[in-house]
Amino acid sequence: MRSLLTSLLLLTRQVQHSLTYTLLSNQSLQHLIPPPPFSPFTYPDPDFDPIHSTLLAPILQPRVPGTPGHAAVQHHFTSFIRNRLHPSWQVLWHNTTSTTPATGDRQVPFQNLILRRDPPWASDAGEGEVARLTLAAHYDSLYRPEGFVGAIDSAVPCALLLFVAQAVDEALTRRWEGMESDGGGLEEEKGVQILLLDGEEAWVEWSEVDSLYGSRALAEAWEGTRYEAGSSFSTPLEAISLFVLLDLLGAAEPNIPSYFPSTHWAYQHVAKIEGRLRKLGVLETKPRKPFLPESDKEGVQFFRGFVQDDHVPFMQRGVDILHIIPTPFPAVWHTMDDDGDHLDVPTIRDWARIMTSFVAEWMDLEGYVPEADPRRAENKYSEKQEL
Ligand SMILES: [Zn+2]
């Protein structure tokens, strides 16, 4: 993304759909991902160790679109999904091509991965009935410098989102099975989707045409896809209840501002979760100030600027955005030092706890959080893990 802050034209949604949001109890917050020493996190961390983990480590390689490293990471994502997530998650690929200023006439492929879990009765009700919490990160890496890994940019955010999917999976299953057997769920159609976006980075120099290749194409495609007439939402774009974009996470002491007055309420929910988890002793880090320190920010304090990133094509079309990105950017940003050696694993694990709890609250999972950590059953949906 580009660090320059540009003037902000905020388009607010014409239609606000009312959604429930249920706070987790202290017990659920503690059970979701327990604190040390009861934590399932062991050393080396099975999910987030930069060298030995089965989730993050395979992403820590150059991932320039159209190269073997990029294809290997795509394969890693689909293996993880197949082996570690409930089979009801839908995997959709959104494929486009584009030339870039660095690659001449060659058409470079850009492939967004959409991972979606809707309530089991949603297919009967109609696709246009489901409001989807949308969590996004980009998985491509910079073209130059050659060999650039992009650990915080954005291997860690991708790993966090897949981790969150797995961490809420069992509770979602339990909740929806319960609602189905009650014959319920009719008044509420709430799903969750993860966008692993391609082609975020500029190839030569950031501009409107040299950046955001994947997200520009996806936002345009979703704006033009019509659901059945009479549906609650007319397009997949309109069905996005909130677009949460994670970027540049994984370095210690992040400072996440609240960028948008229109979604400050959602920022406050995440900040409140952070505060409660810290108080409960669930988080491992002891930063000088909270990761999300701006809960009390008020109207005039929002200066009208934001960081250019994958949310822009969606925001321009009226989607509500929560941008979880530090300002200032971590010092390693767009340098060869943005690699596994410069990550702070306790910070990553605390992000995993915070974001898992937020998704669990959004999806109303209070009462359904299992006591045993579902992550212990590795590869529960497949006998063999392909790497
Ligand atoms: Zn970048």
Image (tube, grey):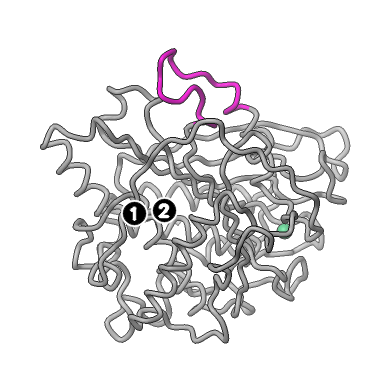
Is label 2 within 8 A of ligand 1 (CB to nearest ligand atom)? no
Assess disc 1: are there few (<14), some (14-19) or many (≥20) residues with their C-alpha within 10 Å of its C-alpha.
many
Residues in magenta, as a range: 221-238
Closest to the observer: 52 or 17? 17
Task: Write down the quadrant of residue 340 in the picture.
Answer: bottom right
Horizontally, is 290 left or right of 148 in the view?
Answer: left
* Distance between mark 2 and mark 1 Cα atoms: 6 Å
* Position above or below: 67 against 38: above
- Residue 84 is marked as 1
Name the residue type under label 2: Phe
At x 42%, y 76%, the residue is: 45
Closest to the observer: 333 or 278? 278
* Position above or below: 354 against 384: below
Where is ligand 1, by quadrant?
bottom right
- Residue 80 is marked as 2
* Discs 2, 1 touching: Cβ within 8 Å: yes
At x 73%, y 68%, the residue is: 333
Residue 224, magenta (yes or no)? yes
Horizontally, is 136 left or right of 272 in the view?
Answer: right
* Position above or below: 259 against 178: below
- What is the quadrant of the N terminus in the image? bottom right
Residue furthest to the top in view is 229
Task: Write down the quadrant of residue 98 in the picture.
Answer: top right
- What is the quadrant of the C terminus in the image? bottom left
Name the residue type under label 1: Arg
